[in-house]
Image (cartoon, rainbow, N blue to C red):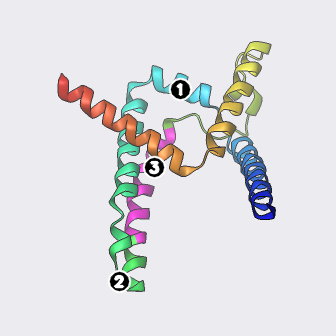
Amino acid sequence: MSIEYALEIYDQKRQYISIILSVIVVLMFNIDTVNIIDNLSKSEITSTLSNKITEVIVSNSESNSCSQVNEDTEFQTCIQEQFATTFMALDGIDNLPIGWNFSQPLKEQFTPLSFSYIIKAVTGWIISIIAISQGAPFWFGILNNLINFKSNRSAKN
């Protein structure tokens, strides 16, 4: 009975810590899901770029080629190569509306400055907090399903 109770408390604390870290990341980097989706739906270049980045990240996570390496130096080299590939893919993500514009932060985020835009931004932040707190395995599964759906849809056409 005490082990089950300890596991329950551990899960609760883990979830609280995950949510707190998510709030910090979202507000620090201004990750507004509603604004990102709006930007992706309006810009074909950004949408195409994000699709390619998603494919690179999912293929790196699925390959697990580094788990089959025996020596530590080979493992470090493998990890560095995967990191470099992912970082190069993420290098072109400048078009996404992530981050604060410190020269005019309120004008950038809430243009025009009205109650509806503030509610829209706060809603986007809350969605981002919930999404980030779910953890990586959940989102890699979602991305994998999305890529499979898109490839199946394009194969039918």
Alpha carbons under labels 2 and 1: distance apart: 42 Å
105 and 6: which one is in front? 6
Location of the C terminus by quadrant is: top left
Q: Which residue is mark 1?
A: 37
103 and 18: which one is in front? 18
136 and 45: which one is in front? 136
What residue do we see at 71% from left, 25% from top? 123
Location of the N terminus by quadrant is: bottom right
Q: Which residue is mark 3?
A: 90
| Residue 103 visible here | yes
Q: Which residue is mark 2?
A: 70
Alpha carbons under labels 3 and 2: distance apart: 29 Å
Q: Residues within 10 Å of mark 2 (few under 14, many from 20)?
A: few
Q: Tag 1: residue type?
A: Ile
Q: Tag 3: residue type?
A: Leu
- Give the magenta range: 79-94
Q: Tag 2: residue type?
A: Asn
